Every structure is written in C-alpha cells, then in structure tokens.
Image (cartoon, rainbow, N blue to C red):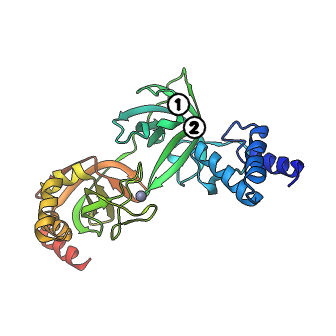
C-alpha cells in the first residue's frame, strides 16, 4: 500500500463525511496508515473501521452516508420519511424530562404546519434549547416510529437562534365514534429498553436490538367508527389508564396471576368495546394519538355498534 493510495482512500472518506463532520485528511491518512502498516490490516478492513469511527462520531448509520450537497429546508408536515438530513425553522413548543442519560433534551418542535418530537443527544454537546424560542436548525436527521416522525439533533447539527418568532400551528384533530375494535399489540406490552428505541417487542425480541429484557407498558390500538369512516387511535399508558381504569401495576398483577399477558387486553376489551368516545390529539401517519378523550353517551345505537364490532 503506497502513501498515495492511502491518501486517495482518505480523500474519499473525507468526501463521504463532508456534510456532517469537519475532518482533516491528514488525520484520516494517519488512522489508515496505522491500521495498514503497523497492524497489517487489509486496506478494505481498515477503511471500514475508520468509516465506522466517523459514523459513530456523527451519530449516523452506514446507509446515511454521503450523497453530498446541502439539505432541503423542510416544514414539520413535510417530514414523511426516516433517515433524511434536513434543515428546519422551528419554535421549541415543549421540553420534556429526558428518560435516559444519553438524551440531553427531548420535546416538541413546531412551525406553521404542526409539531414534531425532537431528541438531542448528550454526546452531541450542543447548546441548550429554550422553550418558546425560535431556531434555525441545520443538519437534523428524521426518524420514524409507528408512523410517528421525529427529528434527531446530532453532533453535526447547527443551532441558530432566530429574531423572528416561528408561529406554531395546531395539528390536533377531534374524532368521535364507537370503539369497534382493539387491535393486536394492545393491553400489557413490552418495549425495548435500549436508549430511545422503545419498539414493542415481539416474542421478547426487538426488531432492531434482538432479544432484550423488555419494559412493561400499557397501550391500546383501537378503531373508532363514526358510522361513515373508521379512524385508528393509539392510547398511551396514561390515556389507556384513563380509558380503562386499569393501571400498569394492576395490569402486571393480572398478567402474573394468569401467567399470561393477554388477559389484560381481554379485560380491557370487555370494558370499552362498543362504547362511544370523543378523542382529540395529533395525527401521525394513519393514527390519531389520544391526548384527550371523553366518553359520550346517548347518541349511539348500541346494538348496531355491537353487531359491527362482532363482525370485524
Ligand atoms: Zn430496540
């Protein structure tokens, strides 16, 4: 391996990360040189190893590598695919308490078109965002979980406070209808405990992290039918507890007594199926996420609803 070859490889790597990292070609040459000439690692393997180091540093996945060019300036409602590098002008609507040390800040960003969750990593070492302040964010990465999009601020993100205030639109909707179905994946579920993963486990496995010790959570994926159209609604732990009167602790006890987690969904189904609800919350993909809900009475033909419910 000649020095020229190493330099060519280093320049290619430099180009691959030109959008995300401010790398020095000399540093890359040195890393490759150490692996190839001191440790006798084949160049392909050395290159892979060096690239992996920079992927880690940038908080990127291999398939996000370098198409080159600037990012698209997008609005919140435009975010419809994961793993895209974008720029946004947004206001910090809400900050939440981070659940993991790896997360420095987490909350909601908004613009005229709606709101979107954001996560800022601790290791990214970025300035603090303040609630109610508007920013231009460059180089954020989109992510998706169950049709719900979010953006991640990473080490390469730049944050510029804006003088103008970005107005935040309300993307909440209100749906009413009879709860005609409760879908699988409802009741007492287990989620992946990896930082910021929270995927629902199937048979103890996370689709991303494999077999893990899951953390219990409550969720209902339900279908509301207003007689004209059906809407899929997701109730998180709080909303599920409000809806069913069953707490996470009670659900765990029920499951332990029965040695079966599915008893929880069965019990919940009994209490709420066929009843009429009004649910408000933001939409994500085809779902409405229940922020608020109330039970309605009187205006529904219970027999008709139950016939429908049984037929689904
Ligand atoms: Zn996972």
Q: In which quarter of the image is residue 114?
A: top left
Is there CB contact under 8 Å for labels 2 and 1?
yes
In depth, the one of 160 and 30 nearer the eye is 30
- Answer with the quadrant where ligand 1 appears in the image: bottom left
Q: Of 151 and 189, which appears nearest the observer?
A: 189
What percent of the width, then of the height, locates residue 207?
A: 44, 65
The residue depicted at 81 percent of the width and 46 percent of the height is 11
In the rendered structure, the answer to whether residue 256 lies left or right of residue 51 reads left
Q: Is residue 85 shown above or below 202?
A: above
Instruction: Give percent across and percent down for residue 32.
Output: 75, 48
Above or below: residue 310 compared with residue 51: below
Q: Residue at x 34, y 41 (%)?
A: 99
Of residue 42 and residue 242, the one placed in the foreground of this image is 42
**SS type, badge 2:** strand
Q: Which image quadrant: the N terminus? A: bottom right
- Residue labelled with disc 1: 126
Residue 4 at x, y percent in the picture: 89, 48
Whether label 2 lies within 8 Å of ligand 1 gets the answer no
- Crowd around label 2: few <14 · some 14–19 · many ≥20 (10 Å): many
Q: Residue 155 carries which label?
A: 2
Please give left or right for residue 11 compared with residue 77 in the image.
right
- Quarter-wise, where is residue 250 in the image? bottom left
Q: State whether label 1 is within 8 Å of ligand 1.
A: no
Q: Quarter-wise, where is residue 22 in the image? A: top right
- Residue depicted at 33% across the width and 62% down the height: 232
Q: Which residue lies furthest to the bottom in this view?
A: 311
Q: Is residue 218 left or right of residue 128?
A: left
In the picture, the quarter occupied by the C terminus is bottom left
Using the rendered image of the protein, determine whether residue 115 is visible from the camera's viewpoint. no
Query: Which class describes the residues within 10 Å of circle 1: few (<14), some (14-19), or many (20+)?
Result: some
> Can residue 251 be seen from the camera position used here?
yes
């Amino acid at each position: 391996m000649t020095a020229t070859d190493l330099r060519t490889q280093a320049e290619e790597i430099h180009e691959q990360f030109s959008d995300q990292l401010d790398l020095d070609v000399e540093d890359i040459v040195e890393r490759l040189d150490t692996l190839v000439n001191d440790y006798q690692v084949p160049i392909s393997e050395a290159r892979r190893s060096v690239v992996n180091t920079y992927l880690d540093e940038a908080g990127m996945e291999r398939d996000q590598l370098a198409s080159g060019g600037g990012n698209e300036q997008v609005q919140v409602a435009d975010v419809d695919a994961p793993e895209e590098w974008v720029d946004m002008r947004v206001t910090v609507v809400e900050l939440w308490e981070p659940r993991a040390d790896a997360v420095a800040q987490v909350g909601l960003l908004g613009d005229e078109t709606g709101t979107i969750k954001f996560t800022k990593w601790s290791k990214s070492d970025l300035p603090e965002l303040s609630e109610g302040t508007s920013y231009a964010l460059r180089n954020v990465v989109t992510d998706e979980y169950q049709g719900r999009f979010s953006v991640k601020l990473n080490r390469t993100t730049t944050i510029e406070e804006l003088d103008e205030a970005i107005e935040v639109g309300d993307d909440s909707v209100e749906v009413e209808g009879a709860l005609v179905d409760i879908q699988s994946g409802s009741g007492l579920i287990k989620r992946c405990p990896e930082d910021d993963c929270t995927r629902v486990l199937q048979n103890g496995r996370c689709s991303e992290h494999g077999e893990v010790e899951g953390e219990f959570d409550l969720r209902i994926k339900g279908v509301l039918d207003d007689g004209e159209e059906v809407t899929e609604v997701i109730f998180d732990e709080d909303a599920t507890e409000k809806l069913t009167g069953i707490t996470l602790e009670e659900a765990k006890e029920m499951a332990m007594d029965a040695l079966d987690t599915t008893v929880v969904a069965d019990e919940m189904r009994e209490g709420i199926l066929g009843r009429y609800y009004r649910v408000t919350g933001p939409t994500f993909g085809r779902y409405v996420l229940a922020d608020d809900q109330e039970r309605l009475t009187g205006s529904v033909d219970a027999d008709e609803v139950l016939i429908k419910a049984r037929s689904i």
